[in-house]
Amino acid sequence: MFDIGVVGHVTKDTLTSGREENVTPGGASFYAAITLRSLGARVSVVTKLNRDDASLLDELRARDVAVSVTDSASTTTFLNAYPDDPDLRRQLVADVASPFTEGEVSNLEADLYYLGPLTNNDVPASVVRLLASKGPVALDVQGFTRRIDRTGERWDLVTQADWREKALVLPHVSIVKANEEEARILTGDSRPIRMAELLSEYGPDEVIITRGSKPALLRARGKSYWIPSYPPRAVVDPTGSGDTFMAAYLFYRRLTDSVEEAGKFAAMTASLKLGVIGPFAGTLRDVREFAVSVGAPIGLN
């Protein structure tokens, strides 16, 4: 039995910032699993990719993350381009791995299941329902609000659109995360507290709305909590910051009944991640020391 079972495509990412270009493994499942494992959780990842890209999983295995992989004709391949503002991203896609099936997740056993879809076809509603029958489900909606606009070229443009199945899926989700723009698209509202209230009405017990470098908002038990944004020591690589926030929240939420404390822990971990290339690979002690340095110590054991 694992603490957290992660379902999502590990991707082949081309990152461009200024004149620099790097090809790395990526995807919500990749960033979240390494964050969780670094903090001390027992983690299993279910993923799909083309067997020729199996080396994308090397870092997960090197960090003692259990990996269950199924062959796909394609590996999800993204191009992420950042302007000077790390809160902004232009995203293109070349290939998309095939959707997950119920059979591919049926043997995954964990205390909690985290779903990180990257496109709106990655995780069918039937897979969400199956996992919810086994335990609580946490979902990052980012992929469900993405639409791929075909360009006829090597790279297709990723844009955003409403998620048609939200009323069918969200009642099976315990914790849901969206960034501010995704929440606006899903609710038709631009007020963070109202967006969180509307998402809660679909069924999730806890709603997380991240807002880049601005304070995040959590809603649980009928109350809303503003979570401070902690100044990063450096901004080196923003890719995966939202995934890091969600993973850190899920990690600490298992240790505390306070969603506010879990939110602060998540915000601090995400801030530390900005200062490194690739996923957060620090430790619980690193987050504890950062919390003290910003004058906001929390109950880290």
Image (cartoon, rainbow, N blue to C red):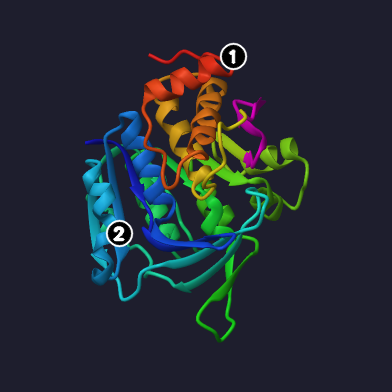
Answer left or right for 300 relative to 158: left
Q: Main secondary structure of the magenta part?
A: strand
Q: Residues within 10 Å of mark 2 (few under 14, many from 20)?
A: some
Kindly identify the residue that appears in the image at 60 percent across and 25 percent down: 221
Q: Is residue 292 above or below residue 76?
A: above
- Front one among 23 and 261: 23
- Front one among 141 and 166: 141
Residue found at the very far bottom of the displayed protein: 152
Q: Which residue is mark 2?
A: 56
* Amino acid type of the residue that numbered disc 2 sits on in the rendered structure: Leu
Q: Secondary structure at mark 2?
A: helix
Answer left or right for 222 relative to 64: right
- Front one among 243 and 291: 291
Kindly identify the residue that appears in the image at 45 percent across and 24 percent down: 287
Residue 170's label in the rendered image is none
Look at the image and give the residue range highlighted in magenta: 210-229
Is residue 227 located in the magenta-colored stretch of the structure? yes
Q: Quarter-wise, where is residue 260 in the image? A: top right
Q: Residues within 10 Å of mark 1 (few under 14, many from 20)?
A: few
Kindly identify the residue that appears in the image at 46 percent across and 18 percent down: 289
Answer left or right for 76 relative to 167: left
Does residue 120 appear anywhere in the picture?
no
* Amino acid type of the residue that numbered disc 1 sits on in the rendered structure: Gly
Q: Which residue is mark 1?
A: 295
Look at the image and tell me in which quarter the N terminus lies: top left
* Position of residue 160 measured from the top left corner of the image (x, y, whole percent): 64, 63
Inter-mark Cα distance, 1 to 2: 38 Å
